[in-house]
Image (cartoon, helix red, strand yellow):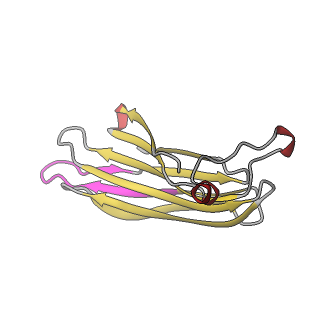
């Protein structure tokens, strides 16, 4: 079973912390109890399998430390030549200490079953009201894509 990998990248000017959490194990590695085998180079890809991965974006209002976290899930199966099944969905993990989730304002599907990839791009609107001052607005986004060879990539940010 693969271990949880975390990547943190501060975006200081925006008061955001981008956290790409790659979690989950593929069906082939879970069934075998060990890491996935590496195919011979002449095969041109990895062995068939399935995986569920996710990518997060988290934000903090610089002066008071209030947090929110959003996540994009991608679940797909592959055979080395194409994606055989594809599912993706966004999740509000939490919004606390003054941050309010205003909704998902952008969604674009990337790839499909029968194609070479499975993923999505999603954007949310987060608001932090501050009585007597201007409200803070963040527009975090996440893009996550699984490929026909089992590889996964993600990126996130906001303003």
Residue 155 in picture, x, y percent from top left: 53, 44
Magenta span contains residue 82: no
Q: Percent position (x, y) of residue 66?
A: 22, 48
- Quarter that holds the C terminus: top left
Does residue 126 appear left or right of residue 131 in this picture?
Answer: right
* Closer to the camera in the image, 42 or 77: 42
Residue at image position (33%, 46%) is 59
The part of the chain drawn in magenta is: 122-138
| Direction from residue 28 to residue 64 in the image, left or right | left
Q: Is residue 139 left or right of residue 87?
A: left
Residue projecting furthest to the left: 132
Against 153, residue 123 (above or below) is below
Residue at image coords 73%, 50%: 149
Which residue is situated farthest in the right direction here? 42
Residue plotted at (60% across, 56% down): 26
Q: Position of residue 85 (x, y in %)?
A: 68, 67
Instruction: Out of 87 and 131, give the one closest to the viewer.
Output: 87
Whether 134 is among the magenta residues is: yes
Residue 144: % across, % down: 57, 52
Tell me which corner region of the image, top left, top right, bottom left or bottom right, holds residue 131. Answer: bottom left
Residue beneath the point at 16% across and 48% down: 133
Q: Residue 44, located in which quarter of the rendered image?
A: top right
In this rendering, the answer to whether 117 lies above or below 63 is: below
């Amino acid at each position: 079973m693969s271990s949880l990998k975390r990547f943190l990248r501060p975006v200081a000017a925006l008061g955001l912390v981008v956290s790409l959490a790659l979690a989950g194990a593929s069906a082939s590695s879970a069934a075998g109890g060990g890491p996935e085998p590496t195919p011979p180079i002449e095969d041109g890809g990895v062995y068939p399998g399935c995986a569920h991965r996710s990518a997060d974006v988290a934000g903090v209002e610089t002066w008071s430390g209030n947090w929110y976290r959003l996540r994009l899930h991608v679940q797909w199966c592959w055979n080395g030549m194409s994606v055989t099944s594809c599912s993706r969905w966004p999740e509000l993990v939490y919004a606390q200490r003054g941050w309010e989730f205003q909704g998902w304002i952008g969604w674009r599907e990337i790839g499909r079953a029968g194609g070479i990839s499975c993923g999505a791009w999603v954007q949310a609107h987060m608001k932090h009201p501050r009585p007597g001052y201007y409200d803070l607005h963040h527009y975090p986004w996440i893009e996550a894509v699984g490929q026909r060879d089992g590889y996964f990539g993600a990126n996130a940010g906001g303003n």
